[in-house]
Structure formats: structure tokens, C-alpha cells
Amino acid sequence: MRVISYNLRKHAAIGELSALIAEHEPNLLCLQEIDTERLPGDLGPMHLADATRGNRLGLAVYYHHERFEALDTKAVSLKRSLHDIIAKPAHERLLGSLLFDRKHEREVAIGSFHAAPLTALNSLRRTQIHAAHEALDTFGAHLPTLMVGDFNYPWFQEFLSSTVQRSGHEVTLADSRTYTRYKFFRGHFDFATSIGMSLTTVQTLPQGVSDHMPILVNAEYAERVQNA
């Protein structure tokens, strides 16, 4: 399974998607900071599963129409930061999609995620990540689940990883930094969490007009080990 996640920087990088799809042939495309009113229903072989509606900076999930069938979607509001309350850029910070994988004849949960900005505390972002995982779990118990997006978590990631592992999920960073803006704001902002899946690679793709680089996730299904 090949998944591209990309923060478009207020929709600025929308024109790059067709070339990314043609070059990398993803099965899934998860977007952040989009203008949902200017979002096409199809991007080549990719069909829009759903997009958030209430956000100024929205989320979307596309799937390859031959590989997947969309069964359900949900936009989820997460605990807000002070920035969210004042500037109101987004309250729906997770878009989850339940898909049927025709190739492997099984269901899978996919999430496009956008955490609170750096003005918020890491503790708030950890709360948002935990709540997002719980929301994706409502699609069904023990489903393989992949959540990708802009986590806004460039520092103290080892602590994040250990915290996330308590719920059985794994954090997988990209092979190089995914964000560059100004002198000090650089690092791994965009990455993936997963459960019931093995992520073989998370590759940072070349930068376009966004301050974020897209990432390409290669994932395989892995059977969960059930507790005795």
C-alpha cells in the first residue's frame, strides 16, 4: 500500500498533486490545509472519499478507485488550542475513512490528521493524537489502521513514541526532515502512526511550493498479536 500525505499550505500546492500521483502511483492520498470548495472529486485514478466541511483549513482523503471501496467516513473535532479558539483555523483535525481493500479483501481505517500548531503544548498534541486513535478505532475493533499527516511535533519525538506505544500504535518518522520555514522551524513534522500494519519506508519527497514536503508511506498488513 502506497500512501502520500501532504500539507498543501493553505491550498497553495494543489496544482502539484497530479504530477505526484503520476510519478509515485499512490493507492491513497491524505491532504491537510485544503480549500474544500476548490477540491476536485477526482484526481486521475484517485477518487475523493470525503473532506471536512467546517474548517478554514480542511482535510481530505482520496483513494484509488480500482483498489479500494469507501465504506464510511467521519470528521472528528479534537481538543482545541488557544490558537484554534482565537484564529479558528480548524476544529475538525481528523478525517477518518473506512475502506475495503479489494486486493486483500479486508477493511482498513485511514486517517488524515493535522495537530494543533507549535503555539500549543506537546501535551495537547499528544492528547489529540490519542483521541484521534480512539476515533479511528470506532470503525471496528482490531482493524489495521494508518494515520498520516502534519503532527506539528518536531521535538521530543522519543517521548511521543513511547506514549503512543502504550495503546499499541507505532510512530514512524520520515527518512529526512519534512518542513522548512525560517531559520529555526525545521524538522520531522509529517509522519505516520499505525497499528496492525508494518511500515517498510516513509520517504520525504522533494519540496514544492508548500513549506511542508510530501511524504510517501509504504505499508503492509501485519497480523496483530492478541493478548492472552
Image (spheres, rainbow, N blue to C red):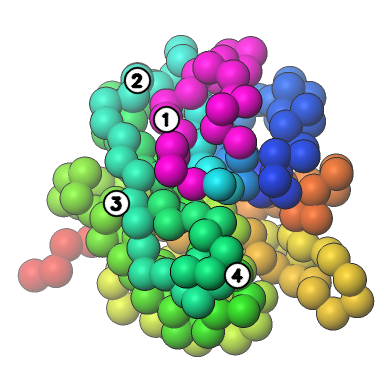
Give the mark, 4 or 3, whose residue is nearer the N terminus. 4
Q: CA distance from mark 1 to mark 2?
A: 12 Å
Examine the rendering and report whether any part of residue 157 can be seen.
no
Left/right placement of residue 93 relative to residue 151 reads left
**Mark positioned earlier in the residue sequence (2 or 4):** 2
Quarter assignment of residue 152: bottom right
Q: Amino acid at mark 2?
A: Glu
Callout 1 crowding tier (Cα within 10 Å): few <14, some 14–19, many ≥20: many
| Residue at image mark 2 | 69
Mark 3 or mark 2: which comes first in sequence?
2
- The answer to whether one can see residue 159 in this image is yes
Query: Which residue extends farthest right?
Result: 183
Q: Are marks 3 and 2 in contact (CB under 8 Å)?
A: no
Range of the magenta residues? 35-55
Q: Is residue 100 magenta?
A: no
Residue at 56% from the left image edge and 15% from the top image edge: 42
Between 192 and 152, the residue placed more toward the observer is 152
Disc 4 target residue:
117
**Residue 75 position (above or below residue 78):** above
Q: Amino acid at mark 3?
A: Leu
Residue at the disc numbered 3: 136
Query: Tag 1: residue type?
Result: Asp
Residue 192 in percent (x, y) is at 53, 58
> Hey, which residue is sitting farthest front in the picture?
86
The answer to whether the residue labelled 1 contacts the one labelled 3, judged by CB atoms less than 8 Å apart, is no
The location of residue 59, given as percent across then percent down, is: 51, 43
How far apart are the alpha carbons under marks 1 and 3? Answer: 15 Å
Front position among marks 2 and 4: 4
Could you classify mark 3 by the number of other residues whose Cα lies within 10 Å: few (under 14), some (14-19), or many (20 or more)? many
